[in-house]
Image: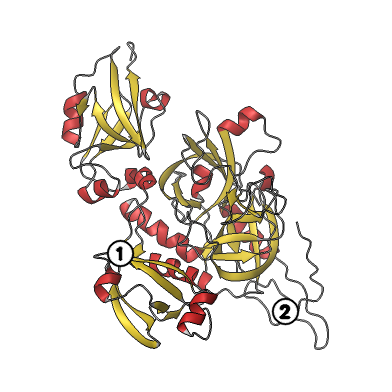
Amino acid sequence: MNHSILRSLACCALLGVASVGVVQAQAPGSAAALPDFTGIVQKNAPAVVHVEAKYTGEQPDSYGGRGPQMMPGQGGPDDPQAEILRRFFGMPMMPSPQQQKHTSLGSGFIISHDGYILTNNHVVDHADKVTVRLQDRRTLTAKVIGTDPTYDIALLKVDAGGNLPAVDLGDSRSLKPGQWVLAIGSPFGFDYTVTQGIVSAVGRNLGQRDQPYTSFIQTDVPINRGNSGGPLFDLQGRVVGVNSQIYSNTGDYLGVSFSIPIDVAMSAVQQLKSKGYVSRGMLGVTMQPVNDDIIKAFKLDNGAGAAVVDVSPDSGAAKAGIQPGDIILSYNGQPLQQASDLPPLVGMTKPGSKVPVEILRNGKKQTLDVTISEAKRDRNAVNNLASAPSSSQAGSAALGLTVQSIDSDTRSQLGLKAGQGVVIDDITGPVAAQAGLRAGDVITMVNQQKVGSVAEFEAATKSVKAGSTVLLLVRRGEQSNFVGLTVPADR
């Protein structure tokens, strides 16, 4: 969504010919031509979509909301010195106040011919209805298969009879500063707008509490409101990133933009498909940068690594023998230049894996093998449970919804008690839809009767009749509210 500096490209020198023919070789001694992106655009534009999310009420001020994302230690939005990191939550051109409350726009791209679409979580977060518009002007209703707020990834699915155009995926780990990249998206509602630039940096950690597990691709590609969730392409026409954020004190593009690496995004996609949520590794340490005081006290050569200040009891780190005061130098064979390099590496590790962690203790290096556990899931991940496959599923045609059971591990992750709650799998009728219920909401009571399984939900709702009102206790995120569903008498 939100994200101009004009760059002079006259002195850029490119050698050779790109595989899609975007760079033309020149005679010896002549200046190299600037790349021609037309081939990439013609091939991939049909797989880029315009995403529209609608809300029955005001959009929640939650992760990915419209408020500015402040960098740590900086001032408020009125501080002229403050640099504000904003997610570009797209809006229609010249929106009315009423439209702003009920609609947001973004971009996305089709990753498989059967209709799976990748976009940002903050594009569709808490939306009641999501639609996508294709280049051929078809508008399709999209189902949110799953979302991951931590990686800011959302997986959508549309049914268009198969054989939809899809992008080719590249390897974001091979990107290097200076490489050409381009974006296709819908800034300010202008569909299929193409912008280009170069990779400014890779492995950029923004130091945010809500996204510590992502090492971003930094570019100077002009990105603005409505680009959120759109693809970032390399010169071979492969997607290497998902456009996500800008660095700005105005809300508009100021020359720096950030994209989620495609390997991180696709790791999330595979997990959302298979189990409805994303799991991340946990080392079990609290750390801080290696500052000047630590360098002097420990007589270090530089500030590389992460200083351990605390170790969680019973964690993999504790069991392996990591102690406060240790300096972590490398993780799984990858050296740490700074402390912020560690969380993305740990987060991408499959829970249960054993990895070597090199530490410095009392001036001596040693390597410890640590078994990585699973990080506690964000309770907002309940929205993804509706996608998890389950054989225990029931529905109520009168109420217009279906539910499924919650396994004990997920119930614990979400802070629910044993035998508490069922999750809404799908909204199938107008009664639940008009009440504002959504897939992923947890129902803990029906007419003051506790429900903790599909069977208990069926028993509590089997006597629902036309004209009656059913009172549900519904939990969404950290909040619970009673919601009354009145079944029409003429149904």
Q: Secondary structure at mark 1?
A: loop
- Against 433, is 94 above or below? below
From the top left corner, tell me how far across and down residue 311 is, in percent. 32, 67
- Closest to the observer: 307 or 237? 307
From the top left corner, tell me how far across and down residue 54 is, in percent. 53, 34
- Which mark is nearer the camera, 2 or 1? 1
Q: CA distance from mark 2 to mark 1?
A: 50 Å
From the top left corner, tell me how far across and down residue 168 is, in percent. 52, 64
Residue highlighted by disc 2: 14
Q: Earlier in the sequence, mark 2 or mark 1?
A: 2
- Closest to the observer: 294 or 247? 294
Q: Residue at x 71, y 74 (%)?
A: 23
The quadrant the C terminus occupies is: top left
* Left or right of 210 in this view: 479: left
Quadrant housing residue 233: bottom right
From the top left corner, tell me how far across and down residue 210 is, in percent. 47, 54
Residue highlighted by disc 1: 312
Q: Secondary structure at mark 2?
A: loop
* Left or right of 179 in this view: 293: left
Q: Residue at x 69, y 63 (%)?
A: 220
* Left or right of 187 in this view: 120: left
* Left or right of 467 in this view: 57: right
Answer yes or no: do the residues labelled 2 and 1 have beta carbons within 8 Å? Answer: no
Q: Amino acid at mark 1?
A: Ser
Q: Residue at x 16, y 27 (%)?
A: 459
Q: Amino acid at mark 2?
A: Leu
